[in-house]
Amino acid sequence: MTILDYTLPTDGLAGCFIDGKWHWPENGARIGIENPSRRDVVCEIGKGGAAEIDLAVAAAKKAHPGWAALAASERGRMLSELGNRLSTHHEEVARLLAAETGNAIKTQSRGEANGAAGVLKYYGGVAVEQKGETLPLGPGLFSYTTREPLGVVGSIIPWNSPLQLGTVKIGMALATGNCLVLKPAEDAPLAVLRLMEMAADIFPPGVFNVVTGIGEEAGAALAQHPGIAKLSFTGSSEVGKLIAHAAADRIANVTLELGGKSPCIVFPDACTPERIDQTAQNVVNAMRFARQGQSCTAGSRLFVHASVWEHLLPRVAEKAAAMKVGDALDDEMDIGAVINEERYGAICSYVAEAEAEGATFLIGETPTATEGGFHPVPTILTGLDNNWRIAREEVFGPVLVALPWEDEAEVVKMANDTHYGLAAFIFSPDMDTVQRMTRQIDAGWIQVNQGGGQIPGMSYGGIKQSGLGSEYSIEGALESYTFRKNVTIGLGS
Ligand code: NAD
């Protein structure tokens, strides 16, 4: 089905794929998917709820023994095949992603479609690494462990990079012999449904199920379902706490990938004449302006040494202000649109509050109500305090707060003075400085002299209220999606 200039899943409009078949929700409910750049409803899809979650969990439970018994290499082969199909269709999927998320095709959605294919191929390749250990318990005993799948995994993902996060959940769960019920975000389920369409004839029925629906209905039903052995959630810390409670109520395994307010710390030696331009660009990249700041790892608190403040800030401002903002499907645009009216409104109120408190706009403005696409411009605020709400809470918009520092102990204290602990960025060519800082900064992922995205193979996860457990790697998959079974054999008895 083609609407405007991108292709939509055909059968996938049912919104749910259960037990090897597309399934329209029994109560006939629908969700309209809006393009946040163009503000048109792209399509309506089925809106699943508790009934569809029940069916999907039952199908996954039925499929689990057969799936877990397959050779790991066979499971890996199927994941790699899905990755290959996604690579073949990456441009079409990138357009879908740009249309539903508002993430610019040029800087974001194309990279996400390719990156997601890479995630599937990575897990396809490492599936065979589900190894156990042998234990030297003493003469007469042969003891070993195996890594066993947990059963049915329930995964809930957000809208900001739905395909990448969807493939991480698919790769980790399926490679390790679990079956999956995946609930995409209600704002951006289409690329995941297109992927499901490609997967339909690869995996046996029931192994990989998708139920689209809103959080309070389908999401809550999945979180609370007694048939789910493990919950893997990516989203806000607020909803993450509800998921953790639901898991605690029945002692289910849980992985949480939550929000962040990541510090970006610049030392004077990163701003020499030879380095300053690259440092400024890395700060812009780390802030994820190209994703409207809608990234959990955005380096949204910039701490610049006072001695280089006057040199670095204008360069960062110049680079951010030069980025073109507009229709996410337009290949000329660097930045697309914020996902929906609610998020846009939240960004407006954060910036308006900071302005009222006396913050200075280095670039940008308080966004105003819009009739057109949700397109706030990159905004950099100075003249504020680390205790202000805008410096403490996750704005999830293109808003960078910049604060000067003079003393290293002071900047470490400011950087760690947050309930989040997802990511951090440090800029200095001096490896002694880097070592000292990486030891002291509380974050699950620290990038030094760069501001890139996650790469399959790295163990990625947050501390404090940014999450529990890690994903993206085979180690993460083994720790989070399997349990160790120990077998001890008495020899010669
Ligand atoms: P969100 O928490 O509102 O929603 C995420 C998912 O949870 C959606 O699928 C939603 O339908 C579902 N949900 C909502 N309420 C629910 C409930 N009561 N029970 C069960 N499920 C429910 O988050 P969002 O606004 O979609 O995404 C943005 C957030 O995600 C940000 O905080 C961002 O930092 C975080 N995020 C974290 C990572 C990471 O890897 N740490 C990656 C991407 C996004």
Image: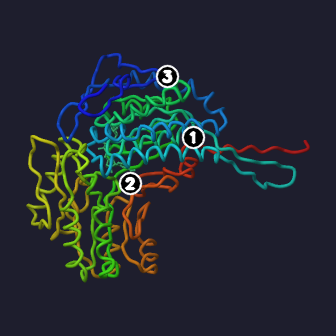
Using a 10 Å C-alpha cutoff, classify the residue at mark 1 as few (fewer than 14 neighbours), some (14 to 19) or many (20 or more). Answer: many
**How many C-alpha atoms fall within 10 Å of the one at disc 2: few (<14), some, or many (≥20)?**
many
Ligand 1: give its quadrant.
Answer: top left
Disc 1: which residue: 175
If you read the primary sequence from the N terminus, does the residue marked by circle 1 or circle 2 appear first? 1
User: Looking at mark 2, is its residue's CB closer than 8 Å to ligand 1?
Assistant: yes
Give the Cα separation between the discs numbered 3 and 1: 19 Å
> Mark 2 = which residue?
466
Q: Quadrant of residue 267?
A: bottom left
**Kind of residue at disc 2:** Ser
Q: Position of residue 473 (x, y in %)?
A: 53, 51
**Taking 96 as reference, is 136 left or right?**
right
Residue 28, given in percent of the width and then of the height, sits at: 30, 17
Identify the secondary structure beneath mark 1.
Answer: helix
Dot 2 falls on a residue whose secondary structure is: loop
| Mark 1–mark 2 distance (CA, rounded to whole Å) | 25 Å
Image quadrant where one finds the C terminus: top right
**In what element is the residue under mark 3?**
loop
Which residue is tagged 3? 19
